[in-house]
């Protein structure tokens, strides 16, 4: 990607994501993530209407008067984006690469984070760790994250989520909100996923191209796996071939959804070309309803 094209894409993401944040997403982000973590503030005398579950029995016994613990909303969160930059992300059948959608989603969520005075960082990976940017605040920092996702030339071609999640465990000991953005076409990563979900608030964002869901009826097609380099000739004019392909795709997506559910990991499936802002808003609102109930 040439420099002028890169600057244009970054500017486009900044404008479109900034508008979405201002109009829609900043409030949704705040309602879902702010307040999830509470920190101790003080002990004060009990007042009528206080929740009895907050009574500090040690102080109450020492003073002879009922006291309660007061908690306040965590003032600052750390948001980490674990982004798959393997070769399968450099694919798009509708004019938009999966990698570009990943950059746009990161930009949108990172701008929401800094609007709420939170920090954002990046771990980019393939079958190795490609890049790490510690979490910081500020619009310029967010633009750097977007630029690096779009501009980085990965050394690896495959996808290894185990490497990415194990690296996260080493560089981030405290709890964070972690968005893993990938097509999740990778060897078994269930053990690393389980360990990560216990330590962090983990959200998986899967990005899929429409042609990965359903083959077009276009006669003989030569399909190449960007990660392995393997080439296969497929007769998409054959109805049985197309149905078999769709069946395999449904099975894979169902297995992925089951894995996330078993590990209590929230999942946002995105299709390139769809309105991902609306998808994110639906997810945030559904998650907020779960919190309330």
Image (cartoon, rainbow, N blue to C red):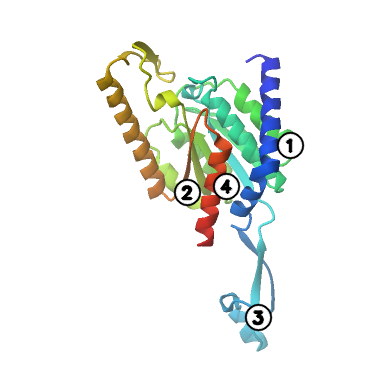
Q: Earlier in the sequence, mark 1 or mark 4?
A: 1
**Rendered view: 111 above or below 155:** below
Instruction: State the residue at coordinates (44%, 43%).
Output: 193
Which label sits on residue 197?
2
Q: Secondary structure at mark 4?
A: strand
- In the rendered image, which residue does mark 3 sit on? 67
- In terms of image quadrants, where is residue 224? top left
- In the rendered image, which residue does mark 1 sit on? 139
Q: Earlier in the sequence, mark 4 or mark 3?
A: 3
* Label 4, residues with CA under 10 Å away: few <14, some 14-19, many ≥20: some
State if disc 2 and disc 4 touch (CB < 8 Å): no
Instruction: State the residue at coordinates (55%, 50%).
Output: 285
**Quadrant holding the N terminus:** top right
- In the rendered image, which residue does mark 4 sit on? 177
Q: CA distance from mark 1 to mark 4?
A: 19 Å
Q: CA distance from mark 4 to mark 3?
A: 33 Å
Q: Earlier in the sequence, mark 3 or mark 2?
A: 3
x and y, in percent, of residue 10 in the image:
68, 26
* Label 2, residues with CA under 10 Å away: few <14, some 14-19, many ≥20: some
């Amino acid at each position: 990607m040439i420099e002028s094209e890169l600057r244009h894409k970054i500017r486009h993401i900044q404008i479109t994501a900034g508008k979405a944040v201002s109009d829609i997403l900043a409030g949704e982000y705040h309602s879902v993530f702010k307040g999830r973590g509470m920190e101790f503030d003080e002990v004060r005398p009990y007042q009528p209407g206080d929740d009895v579950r907050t009574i500090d029995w040690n102080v109450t016994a020492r003073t002879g008067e009922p006291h309660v613990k007061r908690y306040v909303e965590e003032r600052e969160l750390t948001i980490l984006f674990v982004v798959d930059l393997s070769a399968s992300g450099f694919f798009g059948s509708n004019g938009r690469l999966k990698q570009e959608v990943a950059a746009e989603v990161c930009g949108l969520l990172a701008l929401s984070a800094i609007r709420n005075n939170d920090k954002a960082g990046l771990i980019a990976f393939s079958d190795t760790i490609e890049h790490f940017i510690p979490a910081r605040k500020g619009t310029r920092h967010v633009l750097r994250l977007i630029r690096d996702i779009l501009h980085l030339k990965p050394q690896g071609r495959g996808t290894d989520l185990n490497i990415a999640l194990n690296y996260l465990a080493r560089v981030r000991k405290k709890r964070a909100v972690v968005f893993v953005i990938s097509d999740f076409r990778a060897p078994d990563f269930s053990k690393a996923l389980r360990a990560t979900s216990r330590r962090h608030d983990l959200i998986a964002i899967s990005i899929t191209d429409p042609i990965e869901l359903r083959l077009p009826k276009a006669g003989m097609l030569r399909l190449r796996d960007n990660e392995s380099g393997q080439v296969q000739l497929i007769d998409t004019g054959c109805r049985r071939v197309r149905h078999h392909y769709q069946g395999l795709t449904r099975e894979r997506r169902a297995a992925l959804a089951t894995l996330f559910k078993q590990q209590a990991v929230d999942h946002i499936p995105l299709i390139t070309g769809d309105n991902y802002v609306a998808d994110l808003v639906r997810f945030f609102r559904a998650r907020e309803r779960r919190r309330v109930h």
